[in-house]
Image (cartoon, helix red, strand yellow):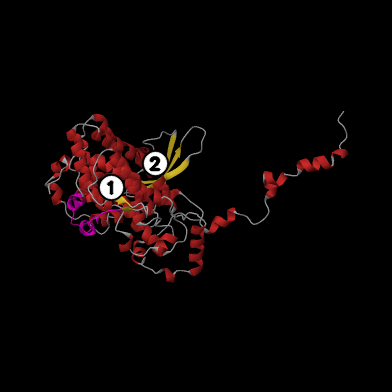
């Protein structure tokens, strides 16, 4: 019998352990289970590398949700009417809730929530690059809720076919909530697109600002990505960056054009022979520059998180029971 | 650049004076497992976990996290540490190698056949 997964913090340091050093019998059993389409649960044996990569991925996803609430949150106090304000608050609350679900899923793998937050605050862990850009007008929030959430849904639906039980379960709940975000975002965009000339201009401006970060959203092209054959076999990675980007373009470019908006890329077109979208180089140097800290909002995003943790500390301390003991969440 | 968010503008300049912070272990409390009964008559189901300082707060946060869209009839929280579960190694004991058809309905599929075959032995009812 068994109470909880115990992984000591010092174990995390040793998680670089090579797959070749794993017990071959256990590794074969683990891979066979995934091959059969079964999920891996926190109490199962798993290779260190599987654990390490999943923690990295789920943790980044959690940080992206919590930081992702900030650009949109910019407009809560100035939403154009009360219904939009309620909807935006609900969406932002959902995103913060997604972070909570994802932190718990990552914790089942043995990294504590405090360690994850510390790594976010210190800049050691990354989050989705797109949230380092500012939401300049109300129309930016509409574009974010429609197109950035659309991208997130493609990514999350893909990942929900993965092999790790707690992550898959969290994603199912998240995807269900995201469908509201997408509908709300599309409704907001259509409202502006069918509005006054100023509203249309505002929307076009927002699209111009967000198109490049959206092209960056799925990550660098496959030609620049590290080899991930093992992660594909373990069902940690289920589609390549380019595959997801193509899926996004297939689904959303026609919808953007339908609204009479111009996508700020003269080279964007679907090649009828290959069936693939072609586009201008979205400047991957900018992507790397921003992800490494030099974007328009990186400093503000982390300062806000640091402020929130620091200012909320006295409340957390006042509530904490001296008998509290850390246990990893069960599943 | 200056923040576009009025809430953040209000927090400035204090915002920029926050020292590098690090959370100590247990800063975000301990964990609870959440169970939810969707409708009257259904079983409560495990839906996930959360961090909370005590059971009452766990219930408040569970309501916020797991029921803010779809209603339910009851919500339970249990400290994770209180749960005892079986291990992967013990999974085998739920799949017994011995024949257990004697305790399953499928173990009783030939009853009709036997009745037909030996019906002649049964005296007519009076
Ligand atoms: Fe989300
Ligand atoms: Fe997301
Ligand atoms: Fe969302």
Mark 2 vs 1, N-terminal side: 1
Above or below, A239 relative to A20: above
Q: Does A292 appear in magenta?
A: yes
x then y, percent, for residue B96: 62, 55
Which of A319 and A230 lies nearest the eye of the viewer? A230
Disc 2 element = helix
Location of residue A289 (image quadrant):
bottom left
Q: Does A324 appear in magenta?
A: no
Badge 2 residue CB within 8 Å of ligand 1? no
In the picture of the structure, the residue carrying the numbered disc 1 is: A66
Chain ID, mark 2: A
User: How far separated are the C-alphas under marks 2 and 1?
Assistant: 18 Å
Q: Is residue A96 left or right of residue B73?
A: left
Which residue extends farthest front? A273
- Mark 1 crowd level (few <14, some 14–19, many ≥20, 10 Å Cα): many
x then y, percent, for residue A302: 21, 52
Give the magenta range. Answer: A278-303
Q: Nearer the viewer, mark 2 or mark 1?
A: 2
Above or below, A112 relative to A27: above
Q: Is residue B122 left or right of residue B47?
A: right
In the picture of the structure, the residue carrying the numbered disc 2 is: A176
At x 49% / y 69%, what residue is drawn? A24
Pointers 2 and 1 within a single chain: yes
x then y, percent, for residue A326: 36, 53
Q: Is residue A232 left or right of residue A265?
A: right
Chain ID, mark 1: A
């Amino acid at each position: 019998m068994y109470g909880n997964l115990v992984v000591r913090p010092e174990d995390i340091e040793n998680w670089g352990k090579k797959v070749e050093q794993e017990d071959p019998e256990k590794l074969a059993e683990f891979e066979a289970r995934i091959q059969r389409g079964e999920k891996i649960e926190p109490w199962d044996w798993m290779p260190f590398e599987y654990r390490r990569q999943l923690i990295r991925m789920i943790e980044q996803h959690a940080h992206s949700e919590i930081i992702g609430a900030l650009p949109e949150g910019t407009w809560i106090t100035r939403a154009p009417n009360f219904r939009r304000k309620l909807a935006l608050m609900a969406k932002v609350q959902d995103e913060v809730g997604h972070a909570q679900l994802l932190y718990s899923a990552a914790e089942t793998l043995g990294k504590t929530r405090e360690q994850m937050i510390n790594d976010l605050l210190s800049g050691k862990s990354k989050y989705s690059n797109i949230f380092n850009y500012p939401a300049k007008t109300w129309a930016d929030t509409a574009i974010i809720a429609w197109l950035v959430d659309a991208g997130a849904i493609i990514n999350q639906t893909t990942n929900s076919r993965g092999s790790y039980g707690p992550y898959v379960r969290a994603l199912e709940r998240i995807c269900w909530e995201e469908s509201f975000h997408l509908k709300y975002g599309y409704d907001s965009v259509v409202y502006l697109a069918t509005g006054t000339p100023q509203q249309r201009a505002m929307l076009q401006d927002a699209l111009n600002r967000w198109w490049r970060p959206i092209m960056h959203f799925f990550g660098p092209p496959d030609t620049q990505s590290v080899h991930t054959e093992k992660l594909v076999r373990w069902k940690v990675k289920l589609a390549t960056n380019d595959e997801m980007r193509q899926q996004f373009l297939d689904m959303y470019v026609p919808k953007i054009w339908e609204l009479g908006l111009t996508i700020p890329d003269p080279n964007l077109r679907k090649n009828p022979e290959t069936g693939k979208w072609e586009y201008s180089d979205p400047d991957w140097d900018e992507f790397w520059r921003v992800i490494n800290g030099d974007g328009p909002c990186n400093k503000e995003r982390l300062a806000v998180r640091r402020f929130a943790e620091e200012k909320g500390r006295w409340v957390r301390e006042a509530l904490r029971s001296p008998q509290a003991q850390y246990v990893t969440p069960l599943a | 650049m200056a923040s576009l968010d009025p809430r953040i503008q209000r927090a400035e300049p204090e915002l920029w004076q926050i020292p590098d912070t690090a959370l100590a272990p247990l800063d975000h409390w301990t964990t609870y497992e959440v169970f939810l009964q969707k409708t009257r008559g259904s079983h409560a189901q495990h839906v996930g976990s959360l961090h909370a300082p005590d059971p009452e707060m766990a219930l408040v946060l569970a309501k916020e996290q797991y029921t803010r869209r779809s209603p339910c009839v009851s919500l339970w929280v249990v400290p994770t540490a209180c749960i005892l579960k079986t291990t992967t190694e013990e999974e085998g004991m739920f799949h017994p190698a011995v024949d257990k058809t004697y305790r399953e309905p499928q173990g009783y599929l030939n009853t009709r056949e036997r009745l037909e075959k030996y019906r002649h032995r049964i005296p007519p009812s009076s």
